[in-house]
Amino acid sequence: MIQIPPVPNLPLPQQEFSQLYLSQLTNILRLYFNQLTNAISNINTVISGIETGGGGYVLSMPYGAFSSGVTQTAATNTATALTYNATDFSNTVSLVSGSQLKVKYAGTYNFQFSVQLQSLSVATEDVFIWLRQNGTDIVGSTGLIGMLPRKSAGNPSHGIFGWNYFVSLKANDYIEAIWSTTDGTNVTIPYYAASSSPTKPSTQSVVATLTFVSA
């Protein structure tokens, strides 16, 4: 942990010139500025491109990473929030009501997400995904995905899709991702369990991160 030196107690000035007072003042200030220099050096220490010691990597920025381990569905042509049931990482960004990613501090954030889509429809189906901030749709945020028809009966087409947005959030604002589909019966956002041949880990249906960029 980086220790910032406390502000020093300076000796009271004398009415008349005093060499002793000047020496004491100079020594106190010299010590204080040396401590400040060391503290700043510890924050910025980089050797051969790698941060070392108490380097800048210890600076903590707001972030959150969330995912869903369940299959998600939506009624046909109905706006439905993407939801999460796991908080993977969190530092002042929290999950509220299953779908809202809420920030504690104001700033510009990078919102990224990916969804695992599948379709059992015999026709091409559309999926729309967009953002809402504090319950209000963000203009220009909609993305359109065209899902191919199924490969065969019981064998769906599938794919993973994602992108990112920069969003400006105030303290306690929240962001949501909303989706809809032209076929709520056959188009889903599935969770896949671990499988074999070869052995593979499970697949989350939705993954999202919200990372602080700048104040």
Image: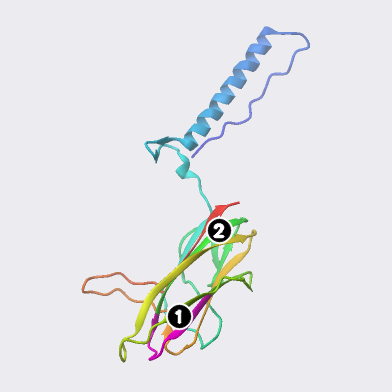
Question: Residue at the location (35% across, 72% down)?
Answer: 203
For the residue pair 6 and 103, the one nearer the viewer reads as 103
Q: How is the image coloured?
A: rainbow
Q: What element carries label 2?
A: strand
> Can you tell which mark lies on residue 109?
2
For the residue pair 92 and 135, the one nearer the viewer reads as 135
The single residue placed furthest to the left in the displayed view is 197
- Work out whether residue 207 can be spotted: no
Asked if residue 212 lies left or right of residue 207, the reply is: right
Segment tinted magenta in the rendering: 118-129
Question: Residue at the location (63% across, 14% down)?
Answer: 24
Q: Distance between the residues labelled 2 and 1?
A: 26 Å
Q: Quadrant of residue 35?
A: top right
Q: What element carries label 1?
A: loop
> Can you tell which mark lies on residue 72?
1
> Few, some or many C-alpha atoms within 10 Å of disc 1 (few <14, some 14-19, many ≥20)?
many
- Disc 1 marks a residue whose amino acid type is Gln
> Can you tell which mark lies on residue 57?
none
Q: Position of residue 75 (x, y in %)?
A: 51, 87
**CB atoms at circles 2 and 1 under 8 Å apart?**
no
- Disc 2 marks a residue whose amino acid type is Tyr
Instruction: Give whichever of discs 2 and 1 has the lower sequence position.
Output: 1
Magenta stretch containing residue 184, yes or no?
Answer: no
Q: Where is residue 149 in the image (x, y as percent from the top left)?
A: 37, 87
Between disc 2 and disc 1, the foreground one is 2
Q: In this view, does 187 lie above or below 136?
A: below
